[in-house]
Amino acid sequence: MTEPLTPSRLWKRMTAEQRRRAATALYGNPEAKSEQQQGAQLIAKHLKFRPKSVSSLDADKKARSLTNVPEIPEDLAARLLVLYHLAEQRPMMSAFLDAAGIKHDNGMIEDDAFAPDEAKVRAAATTIAGAYPKDDVALYLTTLFWQDPAAWAALADAPELG
């Protein structure tokens, strides 16, 4: 990976469908009111609408509109990545963590002080690459690496990221 990973760069790498599903997860999450408002502000600016007009749109229209916003702030992009994976990718997350021998609860790592075995992490990446769509695998593994480069160092040059 040559350029530094940031959530907004990951957002730009996502397919249009992944971005739509991430935005749908955002607007479907009752605990993300602040981020939903931030998204509405970005949509209004992008479409040159009044924020109140955007706020009155249904969740699906806001999600589709947010997908087309070219620049997403880092904090919102980070939240979108997390919500996307929690809403859309739990089976893949669970399969990866199972294959890596990491304790989890439905794809959520249980121990904050875990130390993944590099060989198992690489093998787990290969395992999910054979079972899930390439774009989803690449996004998940890259997101893990972005969140904690030290813990997921074995993913830095994983072929599954490309």
Image (spheres, rainbow, N blue to C red):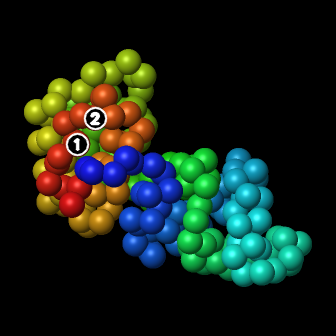
Three-letter amino acid code at the position of disc 2: Trp
Three-letter amino acid code at the position of disc 1: Ala
Q: In the image, which disc is placed on residue 138?
A: none
Q: Answer left or right for 111 relative to 122.
A: right
Q: Quadrant of residue 96?
A: top left
Rendered position, 139 above or below 98 = below
Q: Position of residue 147 (x, y in %)?
A: 42, 38
Q: CA distance from mark 2 to mark 1?
A: 7 Å
**Secondary structure beneath label 1:** loop
Q: Answer left or right for 90 relative to 161.
A: right
Q: What residue is shown at x 58% (from left), y 65% (from top)?
A: 71
Q: Are marks 2 and 1 in contact (CB under 8 Å)?
A: yes
Circle 1 packing at 10 Å, graded few (<14), some (14-19), many (20+), is: some
Q: Dividing the image into 4 quarters, which one contains the C terminus?
A: bottom left
Q: What residue is shown at x 47% (from left), y 61% (from top)?
A: 11
Report which residue position mark 1 lands on.
156
Report which residue position mark 2 lands on.
152
Quick check: can you spot residue 103? yes
